[in-house]
Image: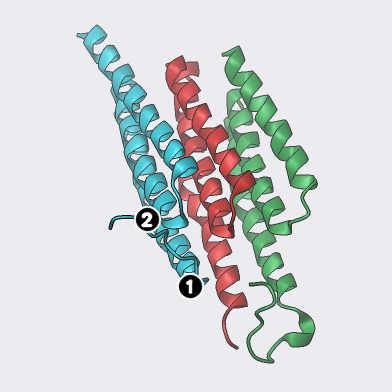
Chain colours: A red, B cyan, C green
Amino acid sequence: MIVVAALVLGSFSAALIRIWRGPSGADRMMGAQLFGSSGAATVLVLAAMLEDWSLIDVALVFASLAAVTVVAFVERTERASMPQ
Amino acid sequence: MEGVREALAVGVMVLGALFFVAGSVGMLRFPDVYTRLHALTKADNLGMGLLVFGLSLQAPGWQLVLKLVLIWIFVMIAGAISCHLVAREAYRQGVKPEQGGDL
Amino acid sequence: MIVFDVVLMVTLWVLAVGAVSQADLFKSVVLFVTMGVVVAVAWARLGAADLAMVEVAVGAGITGALFLNTLGHLEQRPGERGEGEDTSHL
């Protein structure tokens, strides 16, 4: 179980590097998305490790709000580049 | 029987975490936006699915299993939507796919 | 478990310092959103499930979307609105 947590945290830091270096905005957004899903995975593993199953609700909120920021990002660039 | 279930759960969860790591490595190593998106979404869906499966084997009640499956479905929907949107946006902004050597 | 906590704490510091010290506003917003996610994981680690839920919904979801919206309005310069395509940011 601790191995699973360590691997998912490794995924966290990889996403951090991609956000930091990412040449374009799309890369940064992608990093944020990986952060969201690996955050949900971390919370799930924590729920099993701490035997506190109410943490599952947190992961549910993580999963259902994952797309909101991406949609906001796309809507921003779309409107800015639209010929009015 | 309990021991078998426990071992199966941990094995499946380690496999799911390996998928996450594979997705992260792909996101760091692949050459352009589109291939990175590909690596990220596949790893998300499958890694999350295996993690949810492993946790379902350990969950104490069927309500929790229902919630876990719901999480997986939400993650897949969000992954599909954002992958499509980000790829379309990158395409519209003129990000060119990397040209392979021998294709 | 102590390794988990230390990694979480270091990530939090890196993200927080990074978010306030960027020249590029968009990068700063993305770092802020990811910091919200990490703060939520930290709350979950401390056993505060309800706080973590609120942090995800407000800190990472709504505030991030509002910041990105604001950035979109800032990039659309007031003088050029409605005068053809604004390509200065591309």
Looking at the rendered structure, the kind of residue marked 2 is: Ala
Q: Which numbered mark, 2 or 1, is in the foreground of this view?
A: 1
Which mark identifies residue B78?
Answer: none
Lower sequence index among marks 2 and 1: 2
Q: Is residue A67 above or below residue B15?
A: below
Say which residue label 1 marks.
Answer: B92
Q: Position of residue C55 (x, y in %)?
A: 64, 41
Looking at the rendered structure, the kind of residue marked 1 is: Arg
Q: Position of residue B28 (x, y in %)?
A: 49, 41
Quarter of the rendering containing residue C83: bottom right
In this orientation, which residue lies closer to the viewer: C62 or C50?
C62
Secondary element type, mark 2: helix
Which mark identifies residue B80?
Answer: 2
Q: Is residue B89 left or right of residue C59?
A: left
Residue under mark 1: which chain is it in? Answer: B
Q: Residue at position x 44%, y 62% from top?
A: B87
Q: Is residue C58 left or right of residue B50?
A: right
Q: Is residue B3 above or below residue A11?
A: above
Secondary element type, mark 1: helix
Q: Position of residue A80 (x, y in %)?
A: 62, 76
In this orientation, which residue lies closer to the viewer: A33 or C52?
A33
